[in-house]
Image (cartoon, rainbow, N blue to C red):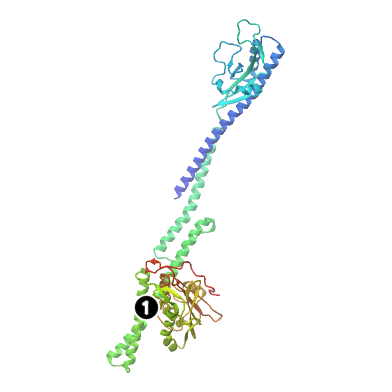
Amino acid sequence: MRRRVSLTMVLMVVGALVFTGLVTLGLTALGSVQQAQRQLVSEANGVAKGINDELGAARAHDSLAVLRSTLGVLKGPLQLQGEAIVAVRTNGTFYNPLEPGRGRVLPSGLQAAQIETAAFFQALPVSGHLGRLAWAARLVGTPVPVGHGRPGCPSCGDVNLVVVLTREAPAGVGSAWAWFALASLLTVAIALVAANRLGHRIARPLRQTELVTGRIAAGDLQARVDLSARDGAELQSLANSVNRMASELARAQRAQRQFLMSVSHDLRTPLTSVQGFAEALYDGTAEDVRHASGVILSEARRLERLVTDLLELAKLEAGAFRLDCRPVDLAQAANDAVEAFQPAANQLGLSLAMTGQGSEGPMCRADPDRLGQVVANVVENALKYASSRVSVRVTAAGGHPRLEVEDDGPGIPPEDISRVFKRLYQSSAAASRKLGSGLGLAIVDELVTAMGGRVWATSPLGPWGGARITVELAGAGAAPASGPGGPGQGSLGGQPTPSAVGG
């Protein structure tokens, strides 16, 4: 990359120099021609005036000799290259009053059609150029008497004389090209050095970033790209992105390990109880067979719930499920969940009740079975953290039915509020009791999103703490959307903005 950057910059500089040289040559040549035109106009005016003065002083009827002598006198100091004194007729044609029989009367390279004769009779100079050949023409004052009294001379009489001058403009910049070439070589050398340094400056951070990403890919999640502001804002932004990626991977790895440890503990604890009571029953040492059997049954159900939730998450992630979304009474689904968890709440010494809306409420579009699973998981999560009470409320906001489940527990730490529904999330605030598999909210997020809704958490609710989980679903009249999860999957779009997060 370093060589490519250097080569590109040098080629750009060379191209710019070539372009600049060509433009400079063209402009210099044009300026040289224009300057020659201006000089010739001035000289033509001087020659015309000199001829007019000489003819006026001679007061001769035949002015041919005066014309010849005057032109010879002026030609030396003016360094004329192509000149002619011609007569112009009223129809715009030219002839040579000094040598009427001569065919060509204008200097070599100049055509009569290129001279606008109409301007002569307005006492205006005429000039132009043909490539590098510049020319100028000027009328000599008043008509001049030529060949008066000469028998058989049709061109004799009072004629309008025109001075025509031509000159080849200088070729160009001349010796300046040598200096331009020297300056170009120095510029290319400087550009090569600058390109090499710039290429090194760009390639070094990219090479460092490449090495760090390779270490991250190999499993070293502590590797970081160390760039400073002098390396450029864009490269520093790239380095920050790589460092953030490494931090997120490290955090996800820690969360995965914590999750696996938690799941392993949740599996080992009931397995230990099952194994212990099973051995007691087998050995005949169990004092209360019914109690031992009840413990085995309870722990087996707990294991079943954990394994079921793990499989459920795997199916949700793979999209291997279908939804049968139809109008459902959200309040009725919430009321059913409250009644189902009432014995568990009473056993835990907690108050669980519906507030606000009664048993009839807004209709939502959802899969009845999946909606029951969502409500159950949210209520179970609240019972897990509540100190004394859990309240369930069903409302409608903007045409979207909402389920709100509040608890008076310790609340959700501000740094965890955005990760509550992550699959591998484990709260930093210890739960007051073991309930459920710990995967409920991750399943809720997947199911609610698949049914076209959204879910978010708000905490704390007051100085004591508390948390609220809000589930917003599509209204009953919403059009079903299709997606990987089957009919009815969709999204309300956008992310919610909780009214209070960690405030």
Residue at x 54% of width, y 36% of height = 23
Q: Is residue 439 above or below residue 347?
A: above
Q: Residue furthest front?
A: 477
Q: Position of residue 127 (x, y in %)?
A: 60, 25
Which element is circle 1 on? Answer: helix
Horizontal placement of 307 versus 356: left or right?
A: left
Above or below, 222 against 291 in this view is above
Where is 309 relative to 121, above or below?
Answer: below
Dividing the picture into quadrants, the one containing residue 440 is bottom left
Can residue 187 be seen?
Answer: yes
Q: Amino acid at mark 1?
A: Ser
Image-based side of 384 in relation to 176, left or right: left
Extreme-top residue of the structure: 151
Query: Which is more toward the observer, 64 or 354?
Result: 354
Q: Quadrant of the C terminus?
A: bottom right
Q: Which residue is mark 1?
A: 264
- Left-right relation of 271 to 191: left
Label 1 CA crowd tier, 10 Å (few <14, some 14–19, many 20+): few
- Note whether residue 257 is visible: no
Q: Position of residue 443 (x, y in %)?
A: 40, 74
Residue 25 location in percent, x, y?
54, 33
Q: Please identify the quarter of the rendering in which residue 32 is found.
A: top right
Q: Position of residue 75 (x, y in %)?
A: 63, 17
Q: Nearer the viewer, residue 304 or 137?
A: 137
Labels in figure, total: 1
